[in-house]
C-alpha cells in the first residue's frame, strides 16, 4: 500500500483565498483524522471521521474550517477565507478500529501570506 | 483525561552515545503509549508502542522504551546514537479508545553531533 496520500505537499496562498487540502487514506481504513502542527501549539487533532461520518470536530478552530469525506477513499479540509495564522503543516492520518495507532501522511505545508 | 509531558524540547547527543528521551503521562485508565518519529519534511512514523504485556518494548531502528506504571513514564532509549536518528520524537497516549483518542506531547528534537 502507498500509505496515506496528501496533496498538495506545499501550498502558498494569499490571505482571503480559499484553500483545499486533500487526503486519500489507506485502503480498508475506516477512520480518518486531520491534524494541524504548529510551533506554538504542537500537534492538534482537528476532526475525526469514522465510516465517512464526522464524529468529533471539536478541534476545528472556527467556522472558516470545514472538512468532508464523501467516500471511504477521499477527504478534504477546506479553509475559506484563509488567514496568515492558518499557516501550518496539516496532516491526514487513517486507521481501523483494530489499530491502536494512526498512520500519517507526509503532510501539506500551508503558507498564507 | 490523558496528557503527555516530554521533558526537554531539544536534546543533543554525540554519535555513538546513549539516547534518552523522557516522557511522562497522565491517564485515568491503563494507557496505550506510543513513540512516533518525524524526519524533516515528513509525516509521523510509529517507532514503537505499548498496549499490554511486556513492559519493555522494542521498536524500529534499535529504539526501545519501558513502561513504568509506578513512575507514569515511558522513556525512549537507544544505546548508540546514529546520525540518521536526528529527528523530532513525539510521545503519545491513548485511553485504549483507538487512534481518535491519541494525545501527543510537544515533541523533542534530537540532534546528533558527529
Image (cartoon, coloured by chain):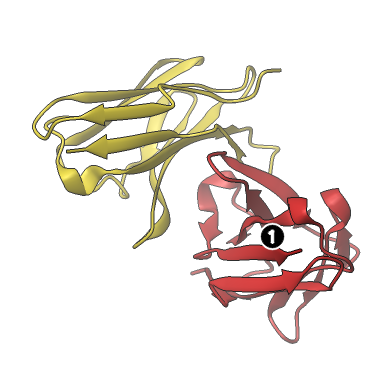
Q: Nearer the viewer, residue A24 or B107?
A: B107
Residue A25 at least partly seen:
yes
Residue at image x 71%, y 17%?
A1
Crowding at label 1, few (<14), some or many (≥20) Cα neighbours within 10 Å? many
SS for dot 1: strand
Q: Which chain is red?
A: B
Q: Would you place residue A14 above or below residue B102 in this image?
A: above
Q: Nearer the viewer, residue B55 or B110?
A: B110
Residue at image x 61%, y 22%?
A26
Splitting the image into 4 quarters, where does residue B24 fall? bottom right
Q: What residue would you read off at disc 1?
A: B32
Residue at image x 52%, y 68%?
B2
Quadrant where the image shows the C terminus of chain B:
bottom right
Q: Position of residue A27 (x, y in %)?
A: 63, 17
Q: Give the chain of mark 1.
A: B
Q: Position of residue B11 (x, y in %)?
A: 63, 73
Q: Would you place residue A87 above or below residue B10 in this image?
A: above
Residue at image x 61%, y 41%?
A102
Q: Position of residue A2 (x, y in %)?
A: 66, 18
Q: Position of residue A11 (x, y in %)?
A: 32, 28
Q: Residue furthest left?
A: A16
Q: Residue furthest front?
A: B114
Residue B48 at least partly seen:
no
Count of numbered circles in the view: 1
Which tint is chain A? yellow
Splitting the image into 4 quarters, where does residue A96 fall? top right
Q: Nearer the viewer, residue B85 or B101?
A: B85
Amino acid at each position: 500500500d502507498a500509505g496515506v496520500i496528501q496533496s498538495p505537499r506545499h501550498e502558498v496562498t494569499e490571505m482571503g483565498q480559499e484553500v483545499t487540502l486533500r487526503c486519500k487514506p489507506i485502503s480498508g481504513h475506516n477512520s480518518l483524522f486531520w491534524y494541524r502542527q504548529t510551533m506554538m501549539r504542537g500537534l492538534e487533532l482537528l476532526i475525526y471521521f469514522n465510516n465517512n461520518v464526522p464524529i468529533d470536530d471539536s478541534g476545528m478552530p472556527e467556522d472558516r474550517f470545514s472538512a468532508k469525506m464523501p467516500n471511504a477513499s477521499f477527504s478534504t479540509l477546506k479553509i475559506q477565507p484563509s488567514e496568515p495564522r492558518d499557516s501550518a503543516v496539516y496532516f491526514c492520518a487513517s486507521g481501523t478500529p483494530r489499530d491502536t495507532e494512526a498512520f500519517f501522511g507526509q503532510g501539506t505545508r500551508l503558507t498564507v501570506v | 483525561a490523558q496528557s503527555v509531558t516530554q521533558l526537554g524540547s531539544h536534546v543533543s547527543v554525540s554519535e555513538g552515545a546513549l539516547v534518552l528521551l523522557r516522557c511522562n503521562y497522565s491517564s485515568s485508565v491503563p494507557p496505550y503509549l506510543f513513540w512516533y518519529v518525524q524526519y524533516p519534511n515528513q509525516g509521523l512514523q510509529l517507532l514503537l508502542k505499548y498496549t499490554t504485556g511486556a513492559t519493555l518494548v522494542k521498536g524500529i531502528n534499535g529504539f526501545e522504551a519501558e513502561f513504568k506504571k509506578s513512575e507514569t513514564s515511558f522513556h525512549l532509549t537507544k544505546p548508540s546514537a546514529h546520525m540518521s536518528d536526528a529527528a523530532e520524537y513525539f510521545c503519545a497516549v491513548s485511553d485504549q479508545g483507538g487512534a481518535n483518542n491519541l494525545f501527543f506531547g510537544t515533541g523533542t528534537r534530537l540532534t546528533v553531533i558527529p
